[in-house]
Image (tube, rainbow, N blue to C red):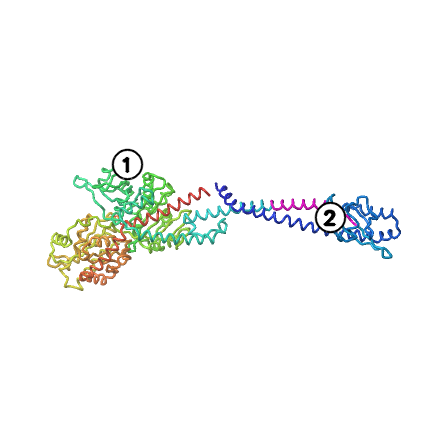
Amino acid sequence: MRGFRSLKLSLRFILPLAIALGMLAFAVVPLVDKLTLHWFIRDMDIRSRLIANTLHEPLAELLQQGNKSRIDSLLLRASQDERLLAIGYCSDQGDLLYHTPSFLVSISCSSVASNVIEASQILQLPEGAVHVATHQIVQEGGKKGHLILVHDTSFMELRSADTRKYIIILFVVLGVVTSLITVFVAHLSWRGWMEGVRAMLKGEGLLKPFSPQSASSELQPLVGDLKTLMRSLDAERRLADDSTITWSPDSLRNLLHKQLAGERVIVVSNREPYIHSRVDGEIQVHRPASGLVTAVEPVMRACSGTWIAHGNGTADRETVDAHDRVMVPPDKPEYNLRRIWMSEEEEKGYYYGFANEGLWPLCHIAHVRPVFRTSDWEQYVKINQRFADAVVKEADSDNPVVLVQDYHFALLPEMIRKALPKATIITFWHIPWPNPESFGICPWREELLKGMLGSTILGFHTPYHCKNFLETVDRYLETRIEHESSTVLRRGQLTMVESYPISIQWPPPWQGTLPPVEQTRAEILTELGLPADQLLGIGVDRMDYTKGILERFNAVERMLELHPELLGHFSFIQIAAPSRSALEEYQAFETRVHALAARINVRFTHQGRPAIILKAEHHEPDQVNRYYRAAQVCMVTSLHDGMNLVAKEYVAARDDERGVLVLSQFTGAANELYEALIVNPYHVEQTAEALYQALTMPEYEQQERMRSMRALVCDFNVYRWAGRMLLDAARVRQREKLATRIGRVS
Ligand code: F6P
């Protein structure tokens, strides 16, 4: 097929070449004929002059003597030359006096005498064409006559035919050789060109200049132009896609349908979206406190498909079918939850150990040292493989779209890629990515990076995390990185590293169904036993040392020190869902949180109104939402956070366009929610003052800030987050398909 394509390509050049050569031959042959004739005549002239000069003296002498027999013999001897046909001698009066026997009667002496025949010329006689040359012979005493030399010209025609033949052969050979060279060059160029285009479609061309060894090196200038064109087209298209689509569950479904041929997606995460537990003999379902679940669940409901996650609820095994699957959400089943089981020992090593004692503190700058143990690593590898096997089983094609979530599965992309080379693997890293030095602490840094580079697309919350990742790869692995297009090429696998700021569902699920904010606030205050005019602050987190809960409490305390008029009029509610409690670091942290809240409350509880209300227990999303609506201020003071969806949830909850967000500068959300009061949580006074500013902010300013933040979250909702990744994935798939097609035909 490839040869045929080259041949076709070559024919396009060869045919015109053959026509041009034919026309050239047509013009050249008569020209060469004329030229050779000219040369031959000149040659005949010279020969005739030479013979005449040689004969002149003896002939003149013999003529003087009148010795006919000797004259005849002289002429006969001279005519022995193979091309000399005949010799004659004419008197000045035009009589043929002597001649060799072969002399042609048609050549008359009178025409010589009267100069009708010039000194030399070709005569067309009935016997054929001859070259006739006349030479004047002057005897002693002045008597004159003409020696006539007649040369045979038939050899000229023979030679001219030969020349014509050779010229035509020359042109044919020239044509064949040129054609062969053309076919050869075209074949090489076509191959090189196709390889170039294929590489570019795969994205490789964007990464590397073509190597000098490659056949396509001569196409480099063109490739350069193509690369630029493709990049700008890509950028334009992404921009257009992003801004023209109103992102909603429907647009996400359409995207899957149109761009990804209705693919069912497979999501992989450690945390499951619905946990079944047995409480007092009854099975209850609850939603975990997880930013990941908050974001991915609405996407999954829109897309359908399968979500593979660790089943760790006490009633999880009871609620699945024979294939460990259960349809969720329980009240309106829309997608499959496929549960993966693990033993306590496995969970201890993979989840508590490697993921949360190693990678979690490694990626967060929260001054807790990471711990790496070989036994944990082994469990991490084992569990990643278990999830990879489950993905392969759940896939209903050889090129599924797989969404891998978070740091629990750094090895998964490469493992899936091995089993399903054509899979589109989108990995999203929900936590920050540290700088290369910090990441270098991990003894298995290369393995983790290689694992992640099995992804088609690798997403982080911010461009800064992408930059850190690329620098880390550059430091520890042999790859080709192109910063301009943010891609990494390793062993033929291209990974696009891009920032996709995660978000929440918009419109919020409860939109239009909730009682007014004032009513909710009044209810909450009653529930808490607080007066109706009490100001409320809210913090919602997992009980995690990265969340800045201690710093937040310190800021509350400092604010009350600086503004004692608020003492007894302000209470800060902290919801802290228990998290990773099996780990000592987390137990110690929880103890410190409780102790600090107690100490502050001892100092600042006024008339039974505590400064801090700590609710260290799990709350379902609807309960959390009530607190968001009731509180005048929400504090997000993470010491380091990938995005922090609490910030966005608070904004979404405030359909009254009131309330103020105090937001740590170390969250990904601070890159988007500029109208929040941005603080450095390590700076106690600054955070305390921001809290005070929030509590005393005029309503019109609250409204302006909140309105603007709500518009942003509405626009950049979770459907856009998923949609942008899926759009990019669709583009990669399209390119790969095209590259395969070109590969087949070339
Ligand atoms: O916010 C980061 C994150 O890793 C989420 O991605 C995850 O769901 C959440 O923390 C909760 O962690 P865990 O699942 O360990 O309770």
| Residue 4 in view (yes/no) | yes
Give the quadrant of residue 136: bottom right
Instruction: Give, as a single range, the part of the protein colored magenta.
Output: 148-172
Of circles 1 and 2, the one toward us is 2
Give the quadrant of residue 387: top left
Q: Tell whether 702 sits left or right of 112.
A: left
Q: Nearer the viewer, residue 413 or 731?
A: 731
> Is residue 633 covered in magenta?
no
| Alpha-carbon span between mark 1 and mark 2 | 109 Å
Q: Main secondary structure of the magenta part?
A: helix
Which mark, residue 266? Answer: none
* Type of amino acid under label 1: His
Q: Is residue 252 above or below residue 324?
A: below
- x and y, in percent, of residue 726 in the image: 32, 47
* Type of amino acid under label 2: Leu
Mark 1 C-beta closer than 8 Å to ligand 1: no
- Are discs 1 and 2 less than 8 Å apart at CB? no
| Residue 447 in view (yes/no) | no
- x and y, in percent, of residue 435 in the image: 34, 55
- x and y, in percent, of residue 704 in the image: 22, 60
Q: Nearer the viewer, residue 124 or 358?
A: 124
- The residue labelled by disc 1 is 323
Which mark, residue 123? Answer: 2
> Is residue 170 covered in magenta?
yes
How crowded is the residue under tag 2: few (<14 C-alpha within 10 Å), some, or many (20+)? Answer: some
Pick whichever of labels 1 and 2 is earlier in the sequence: 2
Mark 2 C-beta closer than 8 Å to ligand 1: no
